[in-house]
Image: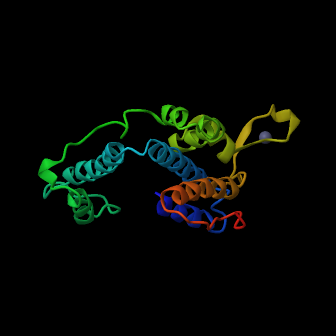
Amino acid sequence: MAFYSLRILQELFGIGIGSSIIGRLGLRTILEIRITLHYLIKNDDKKLWEKWRMYGAGQAKLSALKFDENIDPPKHINVENIEKIAGEDLWEEFMTINLGNWSGLDLRRLSEKSGLKDIYDSHYSWTSGYTHGTWGPIRESCYQTCGNPLHRLHRYPGRIALPETVEDAALLVDDILEDVDISYPSFKVRICNNDK
Ligand SMILES: [Zn+2]
């Protein structure tokens, strides 16, 4: 989970990505990892770790099952890879597929149970709007207001630069690395502050 969040952060470092729509999707995913990992580490229950892992493998199986010799996968899917991932931990035939969220709790409940409701509240809803393509983010990123007073504040399309996401993402990644340090002491490298 830490490697995944580090990779997203590294991708956010690309020129212009941090202030893009995609930057928000990246931040949203890092937030989810931060909350989920903290929940897992706080509970530190072998059954819960297994449930998380099996859910992911089950999702791989479900994704692979959608494509057989009659249905071609889209370009971004390598069915062979996904099948391999699905069967790595447990022989596929024995695997159950859980639908919905891996824990049976939504991210808000996970954040409450792991003491991270504050970062959930500050980061979740606006970034999720970007993930779902709702009006607010569309308005913020794709339209500006016309300055001509005779035009009664109509909006017109434009590619708007958005506030930077990199620093928020890096701070979340550092929190994730704090949890890595709890599980694998001593791991002291951080993105923003290396003096700890
Ligand atoms: Zn106008």
Indicate the position of residue 181 as horizontal and vertical percent values: 55, 60
Q: Residue furthest right?
A: 149
Indicate the position of residue 98 as horizontal and vertical percent values: 27, 39
Quarter of the rendered structure image containing ligand 1: top right
Q: Residue at x 49, y 31 (%)?
A: 109
Q: Is residue 171 left or right of residue 108?
A: right
Query: Along the line of sight, which residue is nearer the eye, 12 or 187?
Result: 187
Q: How many marks do you count on the picture?
A: 0
User: What coloring was used for the rendering?
Assistant: rainbow
Q: Residue furthest front?
A: 185
Indicate the position of residue 144 as horizontal and vertical percent values: 74, 44
Q: Residue at x 63, y 35 (%)?
A: 121
Q: Residue at x 67, y 52 (%)?
A: 168
Looking at the image, residue 108 lies above or below residue 35: above
Indicate the position of residue 43 as horizontal and vertical percent values: 44, 41
Where the C terminus falls, by quadrant? bottom right
Q: Is residue 96 left or right of residue 15?
A: left
Q: Residue at x 56, y 36 (%)?
A: 134
Query: Along the line of sight, which residue is nearer the eye, 140 or 101?
Result: 101
Query: Along the line of sight, which residue is nearer the eye, 138 or 41?
Result: 41
Q: Quadrant of residue 96?
A: top left
